[in-house]
Image: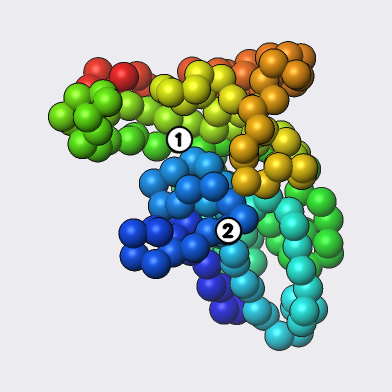
Amino acid sequence: MVIFMSDHGGDPKYGGNNAPFRDGKFSLYEGGIHVPAMISWPGQIKPGTVSEQMMSALDLFPTLCQIAGCKPDITRFDGIDIGPHLFEGQSLGRDLFWQQQAAGNDPKWGLWHRETISAYRHKNWKYMHTRDAGDVLFNLEIDPAETQNLAADYPEILADLKAKHQKILTTFPKRKDVQ
C-alpha cells in the first residue's frame, strides 16, 4: 500500500495555490484543510477510484491497524477505520472537527497574540467562529471558496452545528495561555 497526502494546504507565500478554496496553510478555511490524497494498493483498491468522502489523516492509524490486525492499547482513536469505504465503497457518514492554536504577529490584535480556532463540518455545511467575523456558516457544495456567510439565512443549521461544535469543545482541557 502506498499513501500520498498533505497535512495542510499550500502556503501562498511559497507558491502554494489552493484554488478554488480560500486561504492556505495555518487556516481552517478549506484552502488549509481540504487536501488531496492518493492511496494505491493493487488487488485491493480498484485503480482510478475517486472519492469525495470527508477523510482525515487521523483515519490512517485506525485503518492501518485494522488492516494489519493489530490491537493497540488505546481506548479511543481520534480517527475512524476507513477500510469499508476504500474497499467496499461504503459511505463514511461522519462529521469532522478541527482545532488549532493560532499565534502570530498581528498589529490588529497586538504584537503577539494566541487564540484557539476551530471548525465543524457536517455534510456540505461548515461552521466556524472567527475573531473577526464571529459565527460563520458556509454551504461548501454551492460555495467552496467560502465567500458567503449564510449564518443569518439558516439560523437552525447554524444553531445545530454550533451546538455540536460546542459539545466537542467541552472535551478539550482549557488552556490558560490561549484565548
**Whether residue 14 is situated above or below residue 127 in the rendered picture:** below
Q: Which residue is mark 2?
A: 19
For the residues labelled 1 and 2, the Cα–Cα distance comes to 23 Å
The residue at the far bottom in this view is 42
**In what quadrant of the picture does the C terminus appear?**
top left
Quarter of the image for residue 27 reads top left
Q: Which mark is residue 99?
A: 1
Q: Secondary structure at mark 1?
A: strand
Of residues 144 and 35, the one drawn nearer to the viewer in this rendering: 144
Residue at (69, 16) in percent of width and height: 152
Q: Can see residue 128?
A: yes
Q: Can see residue 72?
A: no
* Picture coordinates of residue 147, whole percent (x, y): 62, 37
The reply, left or right, for residue 165 in relation to residue 173 is right
* Picture coordinates of residue 145, whole percent (x, y): 62, 46
Please name which of the two marks, 1 or 2, marks the residue nearer to the observer.
Answer: 2
Residue at (59, 64) in percent of width and height: 36
